Image: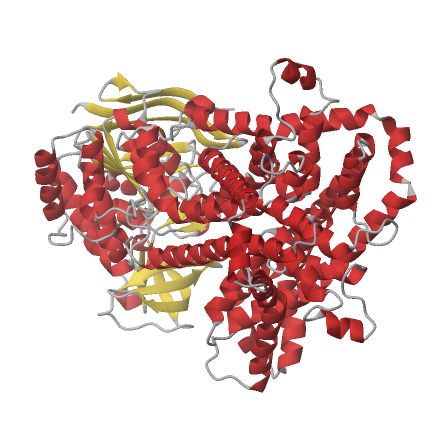
């Protein structure tokens, strides 16, 4: 696969705030990439640097193999969808989308054809003469998308594309955007602080924090082997435990020094009594501290050895109540020794086949 | 400076125009004035500034401006309250007319007010009948300054009051607070800052005001002579140094007012985190 | 907004209306009354007096030049102050506001010092036979000086609240600075610009103090309408003074009405697409 975007050792500071701290990353042609991270982590800065809306203090930006430092935003072949859409309020949908074509002095006839095609693409057929303020949030977002696409950029940049849209419409738009971008085959990078969004929409994810890249890869790869506690924490829900060696199947000198671990809900099996458990002897006793309905399952907060763990339980099973005694089996725990992730499986599981 | 890095074009052009224009119109005249004024030396400056006629003119200017600012604060608060809180016929007319003192040439206001408040004037006759000279007196100056200062307070209070909405009052009413108590304890503290801002702007404007005041002031030295007029008098007798010295006094006063206002607002922001 | 009103509310509204009537409306009525006091023919004679017409023309000329220059400056400085971050930005903002803090009389004095006998420029200007002071150029300069913050002041908050993203969007679509300004920014700020222009025009045509200092009061040459009114008034030619004043009242009321229309349009524009 050809590399469409490459950043090499990008540095960018605003006063004493380091928005980009030695950022290097690549994006392959045709991929839809999610830049994920907490607010203030430097995602938007990266997007603006690629677009040329900011200049790096140091480092190089390549688009399609060409060094782009110092090239004006309009000459980089990018389309940018702003977080607040930045639609031209006094122009109609049609005029907004045509703006880039007008600047490029595309012949009027061709302009009209392209604009009409884009209006159809974004599903706003018949609304071309509306003004942005007469549209819903989702419609505005799609107009911004079409406006950015109109001049046929080779790279589309989207800054928090769903942030300003209400929850229900957001779901629909995510799917629509993913499909549309794949159909067009245009390389795209979008910024988001919402891990669900990144996982659902992106082909690849780049996770950023404090101005540097924590990890890049497919959503599945990142989920399965987070490289840092931060990534493990940020992708999926998880609970930190200060010393994982206290739990059955993880202690007994096997973990040497012991230390901080991260447990995901799906790593837990929570049963009402020993009969429900496959490995009752290897299970911990716990006290249910809270039960919350989560739509397709119950979230169960359970206290084990003074640690509050978070697990899920099927709605089909016997309900648990706050204060109940429960059985908890921990399948695995992430640990972060020596700068890498280790996945510790419960010792009982490995011994199991031997026992039976 | 990272001028080369700006994305939105036009930095150089707009900076150039702004700098050129400011230099030509403001910085060069200001520098010329300060250079000239500094030439007179501190001794001469103190000598002029301590002349009784000058001191008196400044006192008249400050005293009447302060009085007018206080009246403006009260009337302005009333105007702002009525315009934001109530709906009534003619509201838009009231709102529009409020800016009249900004639009009406001061000389026109000056002669109109003088005629209105003179001894045989429409309003002056009542004042004079009561033994109060409403023209060619401190009161007359104050009346003119009230007129030019009218818009400042409402224009500063209105947005804050609108922003405030009726929520605070409703909340206070839920606690059983009476209307007057609610206003005094809940609303007024919120309005104090914009009220002060408006009044300070009116005060500063009053000190420098000339056109609307000269006609009604009477302009008697040691009695109803204001500082800006004294500058004119000194200029007409080619006493440029005295004019410059008085100008310095007035500028210092204006800057101190605005500086104090600025300082107060910064302090308030720090105190309340607003 | 409260719909049902009690006596207290009506009392406040009545009080506000009363103040409005006495403070603002009465002076206007008086101007018209005095202007027409000796009949329509005397009125017409007064306003068609050649000196009055010359003064009117000078006033219009100074106003047009001041507004035109200040529009250019206002656009450039507002663009500079809202689209870029650079060192010294706060200083430029403060300098632009400076004329508000300076008495018009003092502003006039600046130009007297800059171009008068005590100035190093004076011999050069005399050599070149250029008369600035006590001539039309100084009148225009003084008018420009007192009005130059108005347009910037109106534009900066509007442009600030709109942010930079529309301009950045235009930049990513390849628009040049001029294209961005013309197609993207200007349509967004046109009402604020018009508003600022109207305020500046109102102030420019009515400026008295600054112009009074630099003009030399030469009838038919350096007299603006406000100065002409002063001369007539001081000659006890009250009817003529008020007749000329009525012209300025009409201009002020027209500008005020335009101001309100613009404000209304701008508000309406916020709710619709345009």
All told, the count of numbered labels is 0
Q: Nearer the viewer, residue A303 or A66?
A: A66
Report the quarter where the N terminus of chain A lies.
Answer: top left
Instruction: Give the residue displayed 60% in from the left and 65% down from the top.
Output: C30
> Residue B88, how many percent across, how many down?
47, 76
Q: Nearer the viewer, residue A241 or B75?
A: B75
Looking at the image, is B105 positioned above or below residue B131?
above
Looking at the image, is A23 positioned above or below residue B103?
above
User: On the rendered structure, is B159 left or right of C126?
Assistant: left
Q: Quadrant of residue A155?
A: top left
User: On the rendered structure, is B207 left or right of A356?
Assistant: right
> Residue A45, how many percent across, how many down?
39, 34
Q: Quadrant of residue C212?
A: top right
Does residue A278 appear in the picture of this structure?
A: no
Does residue B112 appear in the picture of this structure?
A: yes
User: On the rendered structure, is B230 left or right of A78?
Assistant: right
Colour pattern: secondary structure
Instruction: Give the residue displayed 60% in from the left and 14% down from the top.
Output: C128
> Residue B76, how many percent across, how many down?
62, 65
Q: Nearer the viewer, residue A146 or C167?
A: C167
Q: Nearer the viewer, residue B7 or B256?
A: B256
> Residue C105, how many percent across, how many down?
70, 40
Looking at the image, is C186 positioned above or below residue B214?
above
């Amino acid at each position: 696969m050809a590399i469409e975007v490459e950043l090499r050792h990008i540095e960018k500071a605003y006063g004493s705030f380091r928005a980009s701290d030695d950022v290097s990353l690549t994006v392959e042609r045709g991929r839809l990439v999610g830049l994920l991270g907490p607010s203030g982590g430097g995602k938007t800065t990266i997007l603006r640097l690629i677009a040329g809306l900011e200049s790096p203090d140091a480092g190089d930006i390549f688009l399609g193999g060409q060094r782009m430092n110092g090239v004006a935003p309009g000459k980089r072949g990018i389309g940018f969808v702003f977080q607040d859409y930045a639609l031209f309020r006094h122009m109609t949908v049609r005029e907004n989308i045509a703006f880039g074509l007008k600047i490029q002095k595309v012949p009027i006839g061709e302009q009209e054809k392209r604009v009409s095609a884009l209006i159809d693409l974004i599903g706003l057929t018949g609304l071309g003469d509306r003004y942005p303020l007469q549209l819903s949030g989702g419609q505005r977002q799609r107009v911004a998308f079409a406006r950015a696409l109109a001049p046929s950029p080779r790279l589309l940049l989207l800054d928090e594309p769903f942030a300003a849209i209400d929850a229900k419409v957001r779901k629909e738009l995510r799917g629509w955007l993913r499909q549309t971008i794949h159909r067009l085959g245009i390389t795209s990078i979008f910024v988001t602080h919402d891990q669900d969004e990144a996982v659902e929409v992106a082909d690849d994810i780049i996770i950023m924090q404090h101005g540097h890249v924590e990890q890049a890869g497919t959503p599945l790869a990142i989920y399965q082997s987070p490289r840092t506690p931060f990534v493990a924490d940020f992708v999926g829900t998880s609970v930190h435990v200060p010393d994982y060696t206290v739990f059955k199947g993880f202690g007994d000198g096997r973990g040497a020094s012991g230390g901080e671990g991260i447990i995901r809900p799906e790593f837990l099996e929570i049963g009402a009594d020993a009969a429900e458990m496959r490995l009752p002897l290897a299970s911990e006793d716990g006290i249910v501290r809270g039960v919350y309905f989560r739509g397709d399952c119950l979230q169960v907060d359970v206290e084990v050895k003074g640690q509050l763990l978070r697990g899920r339980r099927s709605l089909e099973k016997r309900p648990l109540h706050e204060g109940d005694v429960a059985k908890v089996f921990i399948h695995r725990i992430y640990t972060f020794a020596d700068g890498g992730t280790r996945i510790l499986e419960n010792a009982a599981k490995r011994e199991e086949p031997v026992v039976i | 400076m990272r001028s080369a890095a700006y994305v939105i074009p036009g930095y150089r052009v707009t900076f150039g125009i702004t700098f050129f224009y400011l230099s030509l119109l403001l910085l060069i005249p200001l520098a010329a004035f300060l250079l000239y004024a500094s030439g007179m030396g501190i001794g001469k400056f103190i000598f002029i500034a301590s002349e009784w006629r000058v001191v008196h003119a400044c006192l008249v200017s400050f005293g009447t401006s302060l009085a007018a600012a206080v009246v403006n604060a009260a009337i302005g608060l009333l105007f702002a309250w009525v315009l934001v809180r109530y709906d009534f016929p003619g509201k838009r007319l009231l709102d529009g007319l409020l800016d009249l003192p900004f639009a009406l040439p001061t000389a026109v206001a000056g002669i109109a007010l003088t005629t209105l408040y003179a001894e045989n004037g429409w309003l002056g006759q009542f004042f004079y009948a009561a033994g109060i000279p409403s023209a060619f007196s401190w009161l007359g100056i104050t009346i003119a300054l009230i007129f030019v200062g009218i818009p400042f307070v409402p224009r500063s209070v209105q947005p804050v009051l609108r922003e405030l909405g009726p929520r605070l009052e409703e909340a206070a009413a839920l606690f059983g607070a009476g209307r007057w108590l609610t206003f005094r304890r809940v609303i007024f503290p919120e309005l104090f800052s914009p009220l002060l801002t408006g009044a300070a702007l009116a005060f500063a404007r009053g000190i420098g005001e000339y056109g609307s005041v000269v006609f009604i002031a009477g302009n008697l030295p040691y009695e109803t002579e204001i500082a800006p007029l004294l500058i004119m008098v000194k200029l007409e007798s080619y006493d440029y140094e005295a004019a410059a010295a008085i100008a310095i006094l007035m500028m210092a006063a204006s800057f101190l007012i605005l500086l104090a206002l600025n300082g107060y607002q910064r302090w308030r922001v720090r105190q309340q985190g607003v | 907004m409260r719909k049902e009103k009690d006596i207290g509310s009506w009392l406040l509204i009545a009080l506000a209306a009363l103040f409005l009537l006495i403070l603002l409306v009465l002076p206007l009525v008086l101007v018209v009354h005095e202007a027409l006091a000796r009949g329509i023919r005397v009125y017409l004679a007064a306003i068609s007096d050649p000196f009055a017409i010359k003064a009117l023309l000078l006033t219009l000329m100074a106003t047009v030049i001041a507004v035109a220059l200040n529009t250019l400056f206002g656009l450039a400085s507002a663009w500079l102050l809202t689209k870029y971050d650079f060192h010294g930005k706060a200083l430029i903002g403060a300098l632009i506001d400076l004329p508000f803090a300076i008495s018009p009389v003092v502003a006039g004095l600046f130009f007297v010092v800059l171009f008068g006998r005590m100035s190093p420029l004076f011999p050069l200007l005399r050599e070149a036979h250029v008369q600035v002071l006590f001539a039309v150029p100084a009148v225009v300069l003084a008018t420009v000086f007192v009005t130059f913050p108005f347009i910037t002041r109106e534009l900066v908050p509007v442009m600030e609240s709109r942010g930079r993203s529309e301009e950045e969007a235009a930049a990513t679509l390849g628009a040049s600075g001029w294209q961005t300004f013309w197609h993207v920014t200007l349509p967004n700020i046109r009402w604020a610009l018009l508003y600022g222009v109207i305020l500046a025009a109102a102030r420019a045509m009515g400026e008295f103090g600054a112009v009074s200092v630099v003009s030399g009061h030469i009838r038919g040459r350096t007299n603006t309408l406000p100065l002409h009114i002063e001369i007539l008034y001081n000659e006890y030619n009250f009817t003529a003074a008020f007749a000329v004043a009525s012209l300025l009242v009409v201009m002020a009321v027209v500008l005020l009405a335009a101001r309100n229309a613009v404000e209304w349009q701008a508000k309406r524009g916020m709710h619709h697409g345009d």
